[in-house]
Each structure stands twice: as structure tokens, then as C-alpha cells.
Amino acid sequence: MPLIDKHDRSLMIYRCLIAVFSVVFLALPAQAQSGRIPVAADSGMVVSSHYLASEAGMEVLRSGGNAVDAAIATAFALAVTLPSAGNIGGGGFLVYHGADGYVTAFNFREKAPLAATADMYLGPDGRIQNNSNHEGPLAVGVPGTVAGLSLAHTRLGALPWARLVQPAVELAEHGFPSSRDMTGFLRRLAQTGDPLYAATRQAFLKDGEQVYAPGEIWQQPDLAASLKRIRDHGHDGFYKGETARLLADFMARHGGLITEEDLARYQAEEQPPIHGTYRGYDVYAMSPPSSGGIALVTMLNILEGYPLKALGHNSARYLHLLSEAMRRAFADRAEHVGDPKFNPNMPVDRLISKAHGAALRGSIVVDRASESDSSRFGGLYLASESEETTHLSVMDAQGDAVALTYTLEYSYGSRLVADGTGFLLNNEMGDFNPMPGHTDTRGYIGTPPNLVAPEKRMLSSMTPTIVARDGTPRLIVGSPGGRTIINTVLQVILNVVDFDMTIGEAVEAPRIHHQWLPNVTNFESLGISPDTRQLYEALGHRVRFRGTQGRAHCILTENGVIYGAADSRSYDGRAIGY
């Protein structure tokens, strides 16, 4: 009898290949990580937050798959390798622009369960109880990712569905090197004995107890089983059958709301993206329930009337105009935007019109900051929005482009895993406005368009965007970062269009963020000089420093060459082209 059976031998070979790939790949020149030097390719490019996911997508392109196929494979692989944000237990958005000029978008944002109510998080005192809209089973929305990827494949995919899910199955079943980026989460998880997180400990800790050291092979058998059901049965492999039963049973035992009926009823939707123009370019970004497209186009319309290049990149006057445009777009966002099925009278066409942009521009004083009036809507509440999301960009040899952003909300979402499923659940219900009637200068607003209701999709800031010229995709951009996403995407576009930066330079440049309330501008702690800050503050702005803003993974085409840039703010991010 051989000392090693066939399965064990295959597993050993797989682990050796993973180890060799990790050593060789991580030893490549700086352009593999990207930074200011973009990766150049002739036939295809995938940029994502984890090198193994980017490689999974690239192998699909090499095998004859198109941009949608590669995006699906990358997204499923991220559900294994990037548990902080990659997911099958969350939701998001995909924007597509074909080389033939066809443009569409897919909405797979999570939904509130059928049993959800507008005041479900409030106690007798009218306040949120125990942070229940962010912590625990009540915070979980009905997941949308699998439905969205399935719908995109049905509409636009080329390779068989099983071929696209299989790389994720192999990564989960056979394992891959644990990332140092996960260490903090694993240590905190190991310290909690709460039975609510028993399945999470089993999924993420060695023998359910010990922290994986960076580089140790981490296997996820329950997740592999869930992915196999998706591989073999598509949409229904998640929303019906064993996975749906396990998830609904977990919710019933722990006081959650999601049922098998909620899962069976969930459907993703194909819908037109928001379309605007900027200095001769077409801009396609996500439509509601994402607020990203509307706010992005509004800001571009405002800024188009200024000679930005002449002001100088990140000069005090440039940053002043930038933050004033942000202030106005975010005020519009708070007042108007939500799930269109529950808000049929949203004035989308007016908000993205050149006339509205010109009117908002006319309210800006070029040498003095505006005030953010918190009483504008009579006192409302703005739900907090986590910055933990992930974005991937893909372009194939034909020139088809995909921008895909999806999330679990908080880093590692709710941190809940239903027994036997292996995947983390979102806490996206926290993106609803849970406590209407309260506003203060810290940024609490609340608007009727985004109140909780059964089967309603919560408002989002995710902004997957494709910029085109003469019907051809030129720039693919997106980022994580909560509300900062919109402003990160804006600045990458301006860096390319107005300041002629390479995609590497555009991604790495320092960023700012203003969101109307609170009335303060966040500067990344490195990159903007003290002199510029003083001149900016002299115009009446308040500045607060923060760590890094976003992780923009982007693609730019120039003269037939595809350039990819993985943001160096992303620990394991990579751009891979061929």
C-alpha cells in the first residue's frame, strides 16, 4: 500500500504549486504591485485586491473567456482569498461597456428581509438598541452577489459557468497562503467565546482555535462545499436547497429575519447605468440604489466649468473647488437618492443635467468656503457606511470592459457565518436610515428615500465607472471606501483627464474627501504639503487628517496598450496582464 494516496498526492502537488507561485510572483519587479509604474499588456488585464484572484481572472482570459467571464472568476476567487470584503454573502454592482459600444449595468445590492420594518432597530426611547443595525443577525441583508454574477453570465458570459467558479472551489478546498493582512481579525476572533461566532471560528481559525500564521496554508472545506453547489446549480445552488436551508436555520436560531422565502425571492436586476459627459468623454457609472453615479456626474458637471489644469494639481484653489463640488453633490444625495422601486419620483435627470451642475457652480464662491446647513431637510439621520469594500477592473482582448464593486459593509461584514456554509454574512442593513428625525453637525442625516422597508435595497456609495471616448472604453475605475468611494473615483478621473497622469500616477496621488456633513475635509496624512493646507484653511475650510483613502484598482488604454494599476494602499492587490 502506498504511503500517500492519490488525493493526498494531488493535494501535496497543489500546495507546492501555490508555494512556488507565491514566491515567484511576489518576487517580480515593482510593476507587479503597480504603484506609480503601471503594468502594460496587449491582450487583457485584471486588477483586483488579491493576486490569486487576479490570476484566476487572467487565466480565464487566456482560455478564451471575455471580460464578464474573467470578472466572475475574479469575484468568486476574492470570496475565498479576501474575506474582509470579497464575498458571496454580500452584494454590489457591475458596469459593462463592450467594444461594440453596448453599455449596461447589473444591480445585485442586498435587500431587506420580508419581515423588516422601518423602526426595527429602535427601543422604547426611540434610539438604536445595542448597535443592532450593524451587529448581530438583524444587521444581515439578503445577499445578492451570486444572483448578480449569475445574471451577468446569462446575459454576457461566454465560457461555461462551472469553469468560472472552479478556481474558487480549488482555492477553498486545497488552500492558499494566509495573508498577514488578516492577522488582526484572526487574533480578535480567537479571543471571543461568543457562541454566535462559533461557525466563524471554525471557518477562520486552525482547528477552530488557533490563528493561522502568515503564509500557512488555509483551507475552507465548508466554503468549498457552498461554492460547489453554486458551481453545479448556478443561482439556485445558493438561493435554494442546502445553502438556503443552512442560512435560514441559522437566522431562526439566533433571532435573524432572513428565511428561505427571502432567499428564493431574491433576484438581481439589469438596468441602465448613469450617463454623463466630461470634456468630451462619456462617463458611465452605477445608477440607484447606488448614489455613486449621480453624485459623480453632478460633481463633474460642476467642475467642467473651471480651468482645473491651470490651477495646478492639489493646489489650495483646486482643492477648494473640489470640496465645494463634493459638498453640493452629497447634499443632493442625502435629499433624493434611494432604491428607485420605493422612490419612483427621484429627479435623476435633473440631478445629472448640465443645467443643474451650472446652477450649483453658480453658488460657489471661488475664494471662500460655503457652510453645510444641517437644517436643510428639517432634521434627519444619515446611516454610517463602512469603508471596507473591494473593486476589480477587467479588460479583454476585444476591448470589452467591466467595473465591479461589491461589499460585506464592515470589514468581514457581520463576522457571522451560518453553520456549514463557510462564508461571511454582510451587515448591510446598517446602510439604511434606522432613526429618522435626527440631524447634527457630526454627519447624522436621515432621509425618507432610504428608510427600511421589506425587499428594499439600501442606499450605497459604490461607484464602478467606465469612461469612454468615441464609443470605446478608455478608463475603468472604482474603489472601496464607503462614502469616500465617490470622491476617490472622481479624483482618479480628474487626474487622468485634466492632469494627463498615467494610470499609476492617477491612482497613487493623494486624495481628499468632503461629504457635506460633517463640514470638514479629510486629507490623506501624506502627500499634501503644510503650505497648501494653510492656504486651503485660509479660504474657510476645516481639515482633518486620516489614513489612506480607498484602494482604486484601475485600467487605462492608450494607443492600443492596456495599462493596469493596483493601488499600493491595497496589501495584496495586483494588476496582471498578458
Image (cartoon, grey):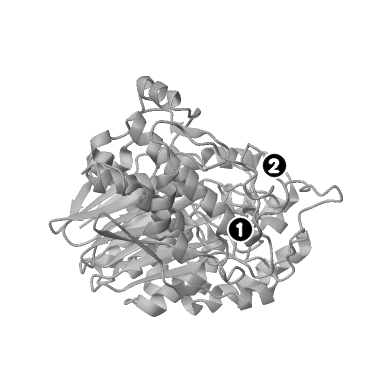
Task: Select label 1 or label 2 by which is in front.
Answer: 1
Eyeballing the image, is 302 above or below 237?
Answer: above
User: As drawn, is 320 to the left or to the right of 379?
Assistant: left
Q: Mark 2 points at which residue?
A: 192
Horizontal and vertical percent position of residue 315 = 32, 30
| Secondary-structure class at tag 1 | loop
Label 2 is placed on what type of residue? Thr
User: As drawn, is 66 to the left or to the right of 371?
Assistant: left
Quadrant assignment, res 567: top left
Pick out the residue farthest to the left: 559
Pick out the residue farthest to the right: 124
| Quadrant of the rendering where the C terminus is positioned | bottom left
Please give the count of numbered marks on the rendered protein.
2
Label 1 to label 2: alpha-carbon separation: 18 Å
Looking at the image, can residue 280 be seen?
yes
Q: How crowded is mark 1: few (under 14 residues within 10 Å), some or many (20 or more)?
A: many
| Secondary-structure class at tag 2 | loop
Mark earlier in primary sequence (1, 2): 2
User: Dots 1 and 2: beta carbons under 8 Å?
Assistant: no
The residue depicted at 50 percent of the width and 79 percent of the height is 233
The residue depicted at 39 percent of the width and 56 percent of the height is 297
Q: Mark 1 points at which residue?
A: 425
Quadrant assignment, res 559: bottom left
